[in-house]
Amino acid sequence: MVLDIVVSGLIGGSMFALLAIGFSLIFGVARIVNIAHTAFYMVAAYCIFFFTQRIGLGPVVSMLLSIAIVTCFGLVTYRFFIEPIREHEAAVLIGTIALAIAMQEVMLLVFTGDFLSVPSLVGGFFSIMSVKIFYQQLLTFGAVVAILIALWLMLMKTRLGLAIRCMAEDREVANLMGINERLVAMATMGISVGLAAFTGAVVVPLTILNPFMWMEPLIIMMAVVVLGGLGSLKGSFLGAYILGFTEALVVFLIPKGAFLKGSVALSIMILVLILRPEGLFGIAFEEER
Amino acid sequence: MKAKSLFVCLCMVLCLWIVWMAPAWAADAIKIGVIGPMNFVQGKGHWNGATMAAEEINAKGGIQVGEKKLKIELVKADSNEFLNVTDATNAMERILTHDKVDFIVGGFRTEAVLAMQDIAMDYKKIFIGCGAAHPELCTRVAKDYDRYKYFFRGTPFNSQFLVKTCFIQMATVGAILKKTLGIPTVKVAIVAEKAIWVDPMIEAAKGFIPKMGMELVGVWRPSQSATDVTAELSAVQASGAHMIFTTFSASVGITFARQAGELKVPAVQVGINVEAQKDGFWDATKGMGNFVMTLNTYCRGVEANDLTGPFVEGYVKRFGETPTYTADTYTVIVHGLVPAIEQAASLDPGKIIPIMEERQFKTPSGVIKYMKDEQGKQLHDLSWGPGLLTSLGVQWQDGKMVGVWPNKWKAAEGAPEITYKGIVPYKIPPWVIEAYKK
Amino acid sequence: MGLLGYYFRKSLTICKDEVLVLPSRVAVGVFVIALLALPLFSQSPYLLRVLILSGIFAIFAASWDLLSGFTGQMNFGHALFFGVGAYSAALLNIHAHLPAWASIPLGALGAVITGLIVGIPCLRLRGTYLALTTLAFPIILLGIIFAIPDITGGELGLSGLSRLTGSRLWDYYLTSVIMLISCTVMWKITDSNTGIIFHAIREDELAVRASGINTTRYKLLAFSLGGFFAGISGGLYAHFMRIAGPSTLEVSMSFTVVIWAVFGGIVTIYGPVGAVFILFPLLEFLRFWPEYRTLAFALVILLILLYMPEGLFPYLRDKLEIQCPRCKIRNVAKRKTCRVCAAPLN
């Protein structure tokens, strides 16, 4: 029982973490609340389906291809639809909603609303103390750790990372120091969408595809980000596991109420926010009072 | 220049407005509105079934109404009901007032069908529901007959009968498990999506499972759109269940079947899994849904009567897939509505309704007879039973959906055994055999 | 008699000097008259239905603007109030057999209470935190509704409510008049001192507090007012559709209202109302093109935003009118000098 909860909490949390970190990154740097974030994840999943099932490429090749394509696509949409209205917070908000709906509709037209699925990268499972774990889940968990380390290295050791951190700290001053704000925002958007696509690639073999699959993770992802503190990667990481474990606890302790896991997770987020309005690790931005 | 382009724009909007508002005109045709979520499998089923029906009837020259022969003209309406109930009611009102249809078939999500039902009743048009299984739709008819008499259920029979059939299938499979594997008491876990149509089924199951000599080990309720049920599966396995009673109507059915198959959970799945009724199930689970059993209406190769074969084969030939139950719009039009219209020799609902209530007719899935409630009030609900509608139990066996029930089924002590044509024996998954083999 | 004549002359003068001089005011006048006179030309039940629903959603969108546009308390879960209004009206109507004229205001009071319950924990949150937190409330309520199907009907919802009025035409007039009245009230509120304080809270909450104003009280007032009007629209919706179901609380409902309001232009009240009357019929209009309907809708929003990020109506208004730099009175864009103080307009 305990081990069950630990395993499913870790797996669930890892997926949230991957999504939330991408979302948090672009918010921290460019103050963009990208509702379409999970829509990119959905598009990546469909790309993989297209390459593996329709064209017949190998899973790894199609995964890499999809991540590349979705990242480019994300940059293009950013350049043409989001950047021109970046200064209008409300407009960005509904612009990204409209973008997500548009992507959903295009996928609906191309792939219909049927439920589809893609094969796992690695099939099979193993068991520890009678708890069965998919290799794919192990891979997801490993990927999260790898991605997080890579991201941390990138942020801490490279010039781009420095620029991103500067932007997150104070956009105007960063601009004054000669950092090309537009370029950094663009690069961050690329990383963020790439992360969403990567999530799609590792998570999708465990689940099913349909054009509306972006809605459900969206809510939990936003809850994770708010819980951890907007713009804080550490917070997103921790928040993801808190909510992941909460959901696992609900499923195992009140099996009849398994459908309530979302509601319980959100209630916990609200409780934390009442106690700490800026989230666990958020910074209270003085200039945004 | 600017004023001119504005003027042009205005003119275009005006033209489009006229096109939009202009009533469609057609003289000698009976208009049947087909309403459903057209972007989804369910709506496609509605439309395909109705198309096939209209083509078949029109090829024969149409419907004989008194002296005249009238052709059928279908009007497609996308209710978008999964996403937006307001949209569904607008679509309903539009086909009723603007397209002026005479009859309506379709509808799926209960919340939306209840709202659409009210509109159809306002206009006193016959609305035959093809998808929602909730009894409420028909109890309304009994409660307020004068208002709701225009509503009939076309398919499926209501959820109380669904439960009954499921229990019979469960008992059948339980007996097989007992016999082949020598399990003294079969342990059952209920895994049901969180939806209201399931609630009474679970209550009933809790009472019924011990009566069947089985033991209930737990109830799990994942959400309809859950994308990971490994937690539930681990818990089910820990409970030592031999059989999982599933009730899924949504995507969680695929997730559950796929993950259960991949984890080789040593328990057989019986019950309702709507996704497993579709041809795409094998592909969607990547073959992991092998040996999943579910209630179904149609299955290639299984014939309830002599109408089943031609319908199923014709449908497969026309649309490239096995019909699901929403494609029963075909049955509703060809076997239900059209003969009633011809018999009434009129399009007046007042004359057609009594005929529909009395008729008993053969359809590809069985014999349809509309039932009354205990007080003898008309319910406009479908009767269930041997010789009437029974539905099938189908199992996925190595990439093919085959019928496994009714196989030598006795509805009651001393009743004749029923076996439909084309039924094959039930197969226990090898990993289950291995787990419990002595 | 003389008094009556005086008021008549006065209103004529107001009409001539204050309304006819500005295109935006003329447009509002034309809109009101057209709305009320429409049944003279067409009584197509379908057309009336679309307009009734537009009216109901217009109140909903305007109430979002009142709460979120003016005070800047970004509410991403506005469907909560709509849903609570709809469900409480339905419960009162079905179980207590209250008629629509009683159940709708009481339902709206239910929404006000919800507004306070939600508002209090949200007081400490700001901006995006608030937006994402409020998004959670309707989903939590949805969980509760599914957990107690005996009372709420689960995903079936509560059906069989009594009708608003006897006929479609009266439904139309009732909703149109309620819509016009509540939007006028909302507009008046935003024009009053309270409205100015709301606006100030949005711009700089600290400065407002420094001026000795209890911002907590005003924020809660905004939550209750927004909740009240959204509750009214929810109740109207439930009675018109004769069903209150979980679809009133779905995330897409919360998103749609934000889309309407931002599309029309926030901090205006008239913007969201106009946007609903354009976008809702547009979605119906696109039915002739069913497969591409939602896609076209999303693209229209994206494109309009790209060129008019402030929203459609403020953009149009700025094209047609300019503000006098000296006395801040609005003038037709064609004028060279201000109509009141005669200062040159450039």
Image: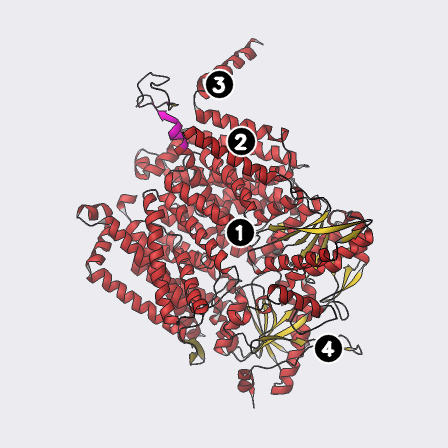
Marks 1 and 3, how far apart at CA: 47 Å
Marks 1 and 4, how far apart at CA: 43 Å
Label 4 sits on a secondary structure element that is loop
> Foreground residue, B422 or A235?
B422
Q: Residue at x 43, y 52 (%)?
A: A100
Name the residue beneath numbered marker 2: C180
> Foreground residue, C72 or A82?
A82
Q: Chain of mark 4?
A: B
Q: Chain of mark 1?
A: C
Name the residue beneath numbered marker 3: C15
Query: Which residue appears farthest toward the bottom when viewing the image?
Result: B438
Q: Are marks 1 and 3 in contact (CB under 8 Å)?
A: no
Q: Amino acid at mark 1?
A: Glu
Q: Which residues are magenta?
A: C316-330
Marks 2 and 3, how far apart at CA: 19 Å
Q: Chain of mark 3?
A: C
Query: Which residue appears farthest toward the top when viewing the image?
Result: C2
Residue C207: % across, % down: 30, 36
Q: Amino acid at mark 2?
A: Leu
Q: Is residue A236 above or below residue B395?
A: above
Numbered mark located on residue B419 in the image: 4
Who comes first in sequence, dot 2 or dot 1?
Answer: 2
Q: Residue at x 65, y 72 (%)?
A: B300
Same subunit: marks 3 and 4: no
Residue B147: % across, % down: 74, 47
Task: Estimate how packed mark 4 is, as few (under 14), some (14 to 19) or many (20 or more) residues with alpha carbons within 10 Å.
Answer: some
Who comes first in sequence, dot 1 or dot 3?
Answer: 3
Residue B318: % across, % down: 63, 64
